[in-house]
Image (tube, rainbow, N blue to C red):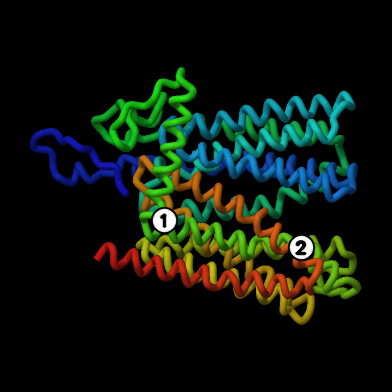
Amino acid sequence: MTFQSQTATAGAPETALAHDPREDGWTRRVALLLAGQAFSLLGSSIVQYALWWWIVLESRTGASMLFATLFGVVPQAIVSMFGGPMADRYNRKILIMLPDLIIAGVTVFLSVSFALGWANLAVIFAVLFIRSAGGGIQMPAVQSFIPDVTPAGRLLRVNSIYGVINSANMIVAPALAAVLINMVPLWSILLVDVATAIIGVGFVALIRVPAKRSTDAVTAAEGPTQAATDVAGEPLPDVSLPLAVLKRTLADIKDGFAYAMGHPYLKGVILGDAFTCFMSVAPMNLTLLLMTREYEGIDLNLGFVNLTTASDKLAANELGLSVGMLLGGALMSAFGSKLLRRAHAQMLMVSFGIAMVGVTVIGLGTATNLLAYLIIDLLNGVASALCVGPMRTIMQSESDESMTGRVFGLDTTLSTFGMPLGMLVFAPLADVIPIAWVFIAGGLLTLPVAGYVLYLTRRGVSARA
């Protein structure tokens, strides 16, 4: 989707109308955005790991971990429903920067509480809640902002690079957190997130967003809002009327859901993402149990490292998945934009990637030895990366500009809820049947999801014919 000028100077060449203002200086804008997100994500992840480990070491109870999961995941899923419409109505740059600054503020408060010795689980849970809620506003804004600063033909490549950054963070963040937690007190580790948030906000603040219409300065993204009216042409409600704002936001959520479910491609990637998280990602969170139950006492000498302890094997499990996602993202970045130019091809890759996720999850349950398990684990990461880049690109390129935030908000909500809901189903099963069967069941149930996405892909082709 390109943003073209609606008017032209008399006698101007027709090609001038087709010029996409996002082509001018896009590499600088994208580099600033990705660099800012890389810093912000790294600091947040380091602090997240440190807090989770502190909870585990101090409480040693399953109830504490359950509450940490609820406060760290559920707020983001709920707030994303409102964060999507906000990204469509208000300045996306502000919605990216403001949550980082608020999260930095509450993190400073938590750091001071640890330094003074009066931090407790209640305070940590409150901070986790605020951090998660901030992510519910920021994530749809970031995903909606990418097509604002990136030419349409570069979206898949940029999304793949963003995926590589996320994968690299999964490798680097826990390692840095482990080093820091053994060297410095927790209150000082928390300040890492504050520093990286300030750096990230600084990078994003430097981005100059190209005007969506060359002759319409009112709708430029640098303004206080992105449009004076909503999709239906109705004036925005006065923000001084909270009930009116809430009513309009709920209507936005409803409109966004109807819009996404009425588009075969958007429906395919959103439901495909949600059901895959429910069927496959939830069992993947049980790898801790799988490794300890199935491979306890089984050593593996890889030449450069000898996996003997439980912690060695768990680290290898996390590293294999992260490296696989890194490789998959790199492949999509290098070749995806050339091979998957059209939305149809991207949808086929989403379907293929979901099928491979299902196959590899089955493989994790049927692996005959630890080496085979780790190889399949790496392939699972590659398969996951093959899905993510095209999914994001479809949601950005196939959504109307006024609906992009709502589409990403809906996707974030459904996929985020998918994991804990899946855990409610699969985790109890792991205590009554062999855990390998849980992985096999999750993988098998994922395969029809790939078929459903393929079906919607064909429907999309028919609808466009």
Q: Is residue 87 left or right of residue 227?
A: right
Taking the spot 88% from the left edge, 44% from the top edge, the residue there is 182
With respect to residue 385, does 206 lie above or below? Answer: above
Residue designated by label 2: 428
From the top left corner, tell me how far across and down residue 416 is, in percent: 60, 50
From the top left corner, tell me how far across and down residue 353 is, in percent: 53, 68
With respect to residue 452, does 164 lie above or below? Answer: above
Taking the spot 84% from the left edge, 43% from the top edge, the residue there is 55
Q: Residue furthest bottom?
A: 368
Q: Residue furthest top?
A: 240
Residue designated by label 1: 266
Q: Provide the secondary structure element on which disc 1 rests.
A: helix
Distance in Å between CA atoms under marks 2 and 1: 33 Å
* Dot label at residue 199: none
Q: Nearer the viewer, mark 2 or mark 1?
A: 2
Residue 32 visible to the viewer: no
